[in-house]
Image: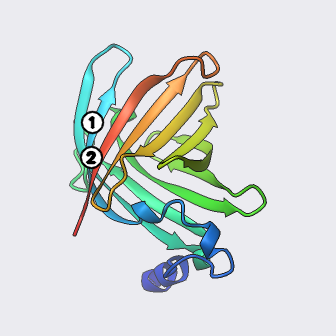
């Protein structure tokens, strides 16, 4: 197997030098993180779990890829309901024409795929999209520090008039 060759071809040491100054949006979340996960279910109950997420430059610095894993790698799949079982990846590709990021999330465990657009909103990173059923989604990185961030996953069934909190990730950087 040529696993090391594949990973060295995928991973990049930083952003594309020709666009680096415009590609700083996700710099603050690059690296490795542990997660405390809170799922706000439709029935009003709360699910809690632990996870991890890893962010890196890829594709000669033209994209950022991450891997979200909930529960943590010592998988407890039998105990985790399918909607809370996440072992997926996001690919974020910078669009120089619009100055935004094209964001694609893939979760092979649940079969979910989402397409969003990422942009800055003050100190936050906001990613907006629409699920296949027409539900609007908003994923926000907020309260970003060198050691922590808070991620909110929200949905709207009324075109964005009101939003329902679905998931929160409380991240701590792994040193």
Front of the two marks 2 and 1: 2
Establish if 86 lies above or below 25: above
Mark yes or no: residue 62 visible.
no
Q: In which quarter of the view is residue 151 placed?
A: top left
Taking depth in this image into account, of 130 and 75 the one nearest to the observer is: 130
Residues at marks 2 and 1 touching, judged by CB atoms closer than 8 Å = yes
Residue sitting at 25 percent across and 29 percent down?
47
Scheme of image coloration: rainbow
Q: Residue furthest front?
A: 122
173 left or right of 83? left
Residue position marked by numbered label 1 in the rendering: 80
Q: In which quarter of the view is residue 48 placed?
A: top left
2 left or right of 62? left
Residue sitting at 60 percent across and 25 percent down?
135
Residue position marked by numbered label 2 in the rendering: 71
Q: Residues within 10 Å of mark 1 (few under 14, many from 20)?
A: some
């Amino acid at each position: 197997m040529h696993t090391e060759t594949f990973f060295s071809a995928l991973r990049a040491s930083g952003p594309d030098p020709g666009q680096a100054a415009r590609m700083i949006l996700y710099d603050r979340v690059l690296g490795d993180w542990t997660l405390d996960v809170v799922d706000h279910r439709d029935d009003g109950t709360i699910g809690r779990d632990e996870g991890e997420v890893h962010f890196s430059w890829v594709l000669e610095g033209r994209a950022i890829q991450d891997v979200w894993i909930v529960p943590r790698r010592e998988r407890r799949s039998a105990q985790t309901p399918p909607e809370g079982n996440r072992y997926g990846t996001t690919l974020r590709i910078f669009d120089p024409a619009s100055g935004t990021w094209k964001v694609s999330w893939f979760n092979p465990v649940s079969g979910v795929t989402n397409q969003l657009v990422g942009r800055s909103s003050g100190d936050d990173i906001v990613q907006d999209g629409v699920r296949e059923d027409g539900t609007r989604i908003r994923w926000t990185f907020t309260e970003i520090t060198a050691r922590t961030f808070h991620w909110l996953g929200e949905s709207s069934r009324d075109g964005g008039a009101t939003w329902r909190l679905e998931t929160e990730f409380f991240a701590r950087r792994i040193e």
